[in-house]
Amino acid sequence: MRYMLMICNEEQAVLNQSEAESTAMMADYGKFFEEMSTRGVLRDNARLRPTSDATTVRVHNGEVLTADGPFAETKEQIGGYFVVDCADLDEAIAIAAKIPHASSGGIEVRPIWEM
Amino acid sequence: MSAVRSALDSAYRAEWGRIVATIIGLTGDWDLAEECVADAFAQALERWQRDGIPDRPGAWLTTTARNRAIDRLRRANVEQTKLRERLMNKTAELPHADLDGADGALDLDSDSDLGDDRLRLIFTCCHPALALDARVALTLRTLVGLTTAEIARAFLVPEATMAKRLVRAKAKIRHAAIPYRVPPAHLLPERFHSVAAVVYLLFNEGYDRTHGSDLIRTSLCDEAIRLGELLVMLMPDEPEAGGLLALLMLQHARIAARVDEDGELVALDQQDRSLWNGALIRRAIGILERSLRRREPGPYQVQAAIAACHARSTRASETDWSQIVSLYGTLHEYWPTPIVELNQAVAIAMADGPQAGLAHIGALDLDTALRDFHLLHATNADLYRRLGRAHDARLAYDRAIQLSTNDTERRYLTRRRDE
């Protein structure tokens, strides 16, 4: 079963963090990567560019409408994601809880629609 | 009522959840399991009238439901190949069931190969990835066996809304791969609370509306207690299960004294304690004491201990309020909520006088939600009244009446205000 774990955080806070904070966060992610590689659950991951670089696309009556900005204007944005392959939702939740941003933001766990 | 009907009724109450749990364990398909178990009961009505009631109705029904599931899956199209493989793998270990034998050849009692799947079912229905209202509905439908229409009536929502809620919950279990299992030991404490919250909500839904004539609602209390008993039986090593059950029983024991002949609420200190169910109180205290002996306290054991303090006092004036104050202090360590503090303030007022209670409330750090909580104002009103501050009491009663959403409660507060 594949799940997408989406990191939701306040992107301004992340962009504004000090060098020391950012080094510490990188170290935490380093540990996380190490553990997940050993477990063999990681399929894909990325850090996303800020929402100021986002474009939202909608199609209305066959017409493609593009708009500057993210899909939802909320305080928190999707800042990155992991795709993991694991046994069930309990395992996905346990992995999500280990993502360093789980303690400062939140992680959305989405099952991947297997085609 | 015919003998067959009453045998079926008691089998339904005793066996529905266990059989559904077994068939889900076998097939992994929740809808199929419910339908096949319902079919088995329908078939039983006909067959038992013709052939007599089997010695072990539960085993007969399980075998019939299982055979029905196998038939349905055999006829199913290729999309369900996976499911069928799963079923065949599991059933390969079992002898084939023969229904024409006396009462079903398979031994499917709880000590058989299949074991008792109900605990897996409870934990899956109450998975924290499901919304609380969905957990409650799913538990009532799948484990208790209430119909969608009955659950809708109990929660005062249209049947279509409740049906949609159940469909969504089952779809999420399937699509998000919520595991059908009892969680491993390190997750148990946290996950037990997700289960306990469902049982407790169920009880309170019934308890808050005991004056009504709608039996579906009052039966929610009984169902909650049955679920509590099931948890105690299935989780002998979880003292909080005993705490939860004792708490429900102690509250239930007061039900006859809780409203008067006109359906009006009667406060705890005004209740006719001879109406309390003494036998139920003794059983509950026995269960609580067994849990406490394990020396692994938790919030449900503490709440039950508070309820037991009240239940033990034959007169309101004999209540050990300082013990209750200290128990609320312990409860606050588990659940640091303003509601717990408010209850503690009430106990302080009883132990040390209304002035001390008001001082405790005055020192609380109240958020907006609690400032508009009717019980806060009702409590203040009562304390002002006892201090003889009639004007302050009246204002607080007015505010409480304005904020309350329950008619019975509003009438009670109005009566107190106008006394």
Image: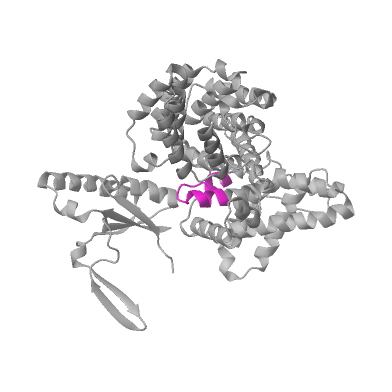
- Looking at the image, which is closer to me, A11 or A43? A11
**Residue positioned 55% across, 26% down in the render:** B307
- Looking at the image, which is closer to me, B259 or B129? B259
Which quadrant of the rendered structure holds the C terminus of chain B?
A: top right
**Residue positioned 34% across, 31% down in the render:** B364
Seen in the image, is B122 located left or right of residue B105?
Answer: left
Q: Count all numbered tags in the image, as a single digit.
A: 0
Can the viewer see residue B74 in this picture?
A: yes
Question: Is B195 located above or below residue B23 in the figure?
Answer: above
Scheme by which the image is coloured: one colour
Seen in the image, is B381 located left or right of residue B215?
Answer: left
Can the viewer see residue B115 in this picture?
A: no
- Looking at the image, which is closer to me, B343 or B160? B343
- In terms of image quadrants, where is residue A28? top left
Main secondary structure found in the magenta portion: helix
Q: Report the magenta residues as a range.
A: B121-137
**Residue positioned 83% across, 43% down in the render:** B55
Locate residue A96, reporting x and y percent.
34, 49
- Looking at the image, which is closer to me, B102 or B340? B340
Locate residue B176, reporting x and y percent.
46, 57
- Is residue B49 in the magenta section? no
Locate residue A22, reporting x and y percent.
15, 48
- In terms of image quadrants, where is residue B335? top left
Q: What is the residue that sits farthest to the left in this orientation?
A: A19
- Is residue B130 in the magenta section? yes
- In terms of image quadrants, where is residue B341? top left
Locate residue A41, reporting x and y percent.
35, 53
